[in-house]
Image (tube, rainbow, N blue to C red):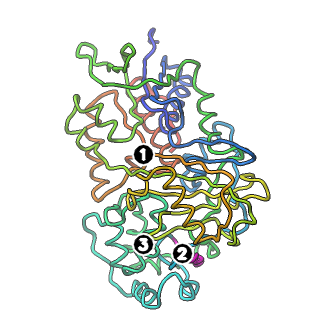
Amino acid sequence: MRNAAFKVVVIGGGITGLTAGYRLHRAAHESHLPLQVTLLEASDHLGGIIATSQQDGLLLEHGPDSFITTKPAGVQLCEELELRDDLIGTTTQHRRSFIVRKGKLRPVPQGLYLMAPGALWPFVTSSILSWRGKLRMGLDLIIPRRPASDDESLAHFVTRRLGREALERVAQPMVGGIYTADPEHLSLQATMPNFLEMERRHGSLIRALRHQQRRTQQQNASGARYGLFVSFWHGMQTLVDRLVANLPPGAIRLHTRVHGLSRIPETSRWRVQLQDQPDLEADAICLALPAPLASSLLTPIDAELAAELQIPYASSAIINLAFRRQDIAHALDGMGFVVPAVENRSLIACSFSSVKFAGRAPDDQVLLRAFVGGAMQPTQYDRSDAEIQNAVGRDLQDLLGVTGDPLHVQISRWPQSMAQYHLGHVNRVARIESRVSRLPGLALAGNGYHGVGIPDCIRSGNSAAQALLEYLGPATPGNPS
């Protein structure tokens, strides 16, 4: 057995880095591999964009408020951390959402899946599209499939199959709520390859979704399939805190900014250069950072890899607002709404947080979460807090009939936090992984590569840890996918 412990440094204390650190520590313990994990975080906060606070009976999520269960890595990690009983689903009432059209909240028709209808009649009777837009969308049933070719943007794909109005009024706001992206640049292959497969197999998105719904008998689902989303009784911070508690004492170093990386020629180990602190040496490195930050650290080591890592990111802000229930005219009989960019509003979307999950606000109050910024509206993010609050307040007055002042307002800014999967992203990631394979003891992880959601980031952290374990030692326990 090795006498001196391997040293692994995880750079980045978001959900990805915490998962990688936890996975390294646990697997090494189970396999008796001598390994010391050090996790470095530049700020004073762990969890990245995940942050929960409580005030005056309100449970405020300053970042994501839930995660999807169809991607198993999130639920598997919760089970492993003995958090299964802490999970809660969305409330069973009002499992629908709205899209804004001409200043009004219009219910998303039953059977709509992100951009295409799986049931025709609810869509025919919906007021989201004009009759011309509905007829154009119906042509999807007869438009021939496109031969397999290069990557295609979401905008081109939706316009080709369903029409321009379907893009502007349905696909852009629905998908924008997930990726905060510009559909003209968003790679369909990297984000929603299932739609490409629908076209390939069935020749029509509508036909494919009708077939799928008949098979799964989920025709009462609307919009974002809210029954598949879960959170925690005490907020998403629960997951972060449990991961931190499962790392060994002294493993985490806050306020520790990495200034540079280099290889030590004599030993092939890594040198981690810290700002205002002594350097560290490591046998292996996990860069759990936004891709451009990883790029800046790797430029002296591999300029070609660093160039590929210049993946664009978008900034967004989340505004938590609490109101007296009596001060909102709208019935709030849904989980929230999305806003097409063509509506020229300050909002991207708004979630009815206290309707979506139990225990988020006192009974006589309503907690809303508004979203601004993203790739489509970067100037909204650049406004001051006061300007954002005023603009959001005007939109909520118009759209929800809000009459009173908010009881509480909290603005959380997340600069350059959401990776943008532009055309060619899949091939770019393949080139990145090829370059990384030539740097022994290095692993990259985060939302810049294979998915932007929390389960995607957890899976990325798992994969990075497993790659480093295989590099450092003999066969080690496998990690969940």
Which residue was labeled with disc 1? Answer: 415
Q: Residue furthest top?
A: 3
Q: Who's the residue at 47% across and 68% down the image?
A: 345
> At numbered mark 1, what does the secondary structure look like: helix, strand or loop?
strand
Pointers 1 and 2 in contact (CB under 8 A)?
A: no
In magenta stretch: residue 188: no
Q: Earlier in the sequence, mark 1 or mark 3?
A: 3
Instruction: Check disc 2: other Cα within 10 Å, few if <14, some if 14-19, many if 20+.
Output: many
Between marks 1 and 3, how big is the CA–CA gap? Answer: 35 Å
Q: Who's the residue at 36% across and 67% down the image?
A: 154
Q: Residue furthest right?
A: 363
Name the mark on residue 180.
none
Q: Main secondary structure of the magenta part?
A: strand
Which residue was labeled with disc 2? Answer: 112
Task: Give the residue type at disc 1.
Answer: Pro
- Is 282 situated above or below 412? above
Front in this rendered view, residue 16 or 463: 16
Which residue was labeled with disc 3? Answer: 198
User: Is residue 214 visible to us here?
Assistant: no
Q: Earlier in the sequence, mark 2 or mark 3?
A: 2
Where residue 321 appears, as percent x and y from the top left, is: 63, 55
Between marks 1 and 2, how big is the CA–CA gap? Answer: 32 Å
Task: Magenta stretch: give its range.
Answer: 104-113
